[in-house]
């Protein structure tokens, strides 16, 4: 047995012991810091990095899909769905990113019990539009699987607006946001490229709802960096119409056994007034050339109208 291997085993045992001590102190009320945060920070070097990342889009079912995927016995969830390390928190460093994932010990334990590999991942839907993220992720995680969820861009834009409106992040109506969408997109893109948007100030930026739906302009940059075999394209429509079949495709893509989930509740579903017919017609025409280019590029048919 090599000295390096022995040191690794001792380190794992020490971290497990230290985590147990923190748990006892936390339960007794003698430790003031958050046990969860402290324990994860101390054990960060023994924690995993993601095997898959759902990179977008907003209001396309990313929360539901992530919840469904993480019900698989061989897939462990992150401490939170949206970590936003590669866009809003890249300055925090890889150690901080690791604190959000399961430990090597958990991975080994589950693999031993199930005789199948253990995976973990996250879902940060802003990644997909960011021009720097494909390269950042590839440099650190060249083998990671990328999952992209799409939706009829007309419905996606309106849902995104309604979500922001309910959160009191809008002071104008949807139609007005369309008029100034190009201006909003330019401001957002400039700040993303300059790394001037951080996790604590993202809420201050106004969202270009229409521009998020020009999928081909964002997705192509991912295919420029990652092999196509590492990218899976799904739609909210197929997730809603054939959940078992869609999850079967996802589990095959992740190379884990198929699994029938128990909780099929949709997440973040809200009701709101319908879009004005004339606005819908306007957006359908606007997105037609982008949808056509996307279908040709991916060799897929979406039938959005």
Image (cartoon, rainbow, N blue to C red):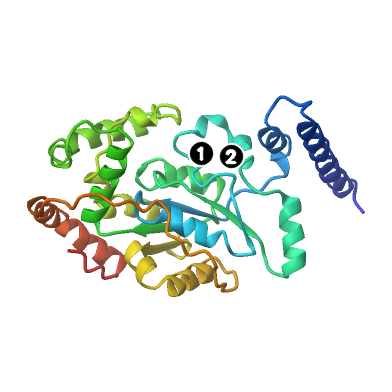
Residue at image coords 61%, 48%: 49
- Label 1 with label 2: CB-CB less than 8 Å: yes
Q: Position of residue 292 (x, y in %)?
A: 19, 63
* In this view, 95 is above or below 103: above
| Element marked by disc 1 | loop
Q: Quadrant of the C terminus?
A: bottom left
- Badge 1 is on which residue? 85
Which residue in the protein does label 2 denote?
Answer: 97
Which residue appears at 72% of the width and 36% of the height?
Answer: 39
Q: Earlier in the sequence, mark 1 or mark 2?
A: 1
Rendering coords of residue 63 (x, y %):
45, 53
Q: Camera-side residue: 291 or 193?
A: 291
- The location of residue 191, given as percent across then percent down, is 33, 30
Quadrant location of residue 170?
top left
* Outermost residue toward the left in this view: 278
Q: Secondary structure at mark 2?
A: helix
In depth, the one of 184 and 71 nearer the eye is: 71
């Amino acid at each position: 047995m090599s000295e390096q291997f022995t040191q690794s085993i001792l380190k794992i045992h020490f971290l497990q012991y230290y985590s147990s001590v923190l748990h006892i102190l936390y339960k007794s009320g003698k430790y003031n810091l958050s046990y969860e945060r402290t324990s994860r920070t101390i054990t960060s070097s023994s924690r995993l990095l993601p095997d898959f990342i759902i990179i977008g889009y907003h209001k396309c079912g990313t929360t539901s899909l992530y919840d469904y995927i993480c019900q698989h016995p061989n897939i462990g969830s992150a401490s939170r769905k949206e970590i936003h390390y590669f866009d809003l928190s890249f300055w925090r460093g890889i150690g901080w990113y690791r604190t959000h994932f399961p430990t090597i010990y958990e991975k080994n334990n589950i693999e031993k019990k199930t005789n199948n590999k253990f995976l973990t991942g996250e879902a940060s839907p802003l990644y997909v539009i960011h021009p720097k993220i494909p390269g950042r992720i590839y440099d650190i995680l060249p083998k990671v699987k990328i999952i992209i969820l799409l939706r009829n861009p007309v419905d996606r834009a309106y849902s995104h607006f309604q979500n922001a409106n309910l959160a009191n992040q809008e002071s104008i109506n949807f139609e007005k946001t369309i008029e100034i969408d190009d201006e909003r997109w330019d401001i957002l893109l400039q700040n993303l490229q300059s790394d001037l948007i951080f996790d604590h100030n993202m809420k201050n930026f106004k969202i270009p709802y229409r521009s998020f739906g020009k999928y081909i302009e964002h997705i192509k940059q991912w295919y420029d960096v990652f092999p196509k075999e590492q990218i899976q394209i799904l739609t909210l429509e197929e997730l809603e119409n054939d959940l078992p079949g869609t999850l079967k495709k996802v589990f095959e893509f992740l190379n884990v056994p198929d699994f029938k989930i128990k909780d099929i509740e949709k997440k973040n579903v809200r009701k709101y007034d319908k879009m004005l017919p004339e606005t819908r017609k306007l957006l359908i025409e606007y997105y037609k050339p982008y949808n056509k280019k996307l279908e040709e590029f991916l060799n897929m048919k979406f039938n959005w109208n």
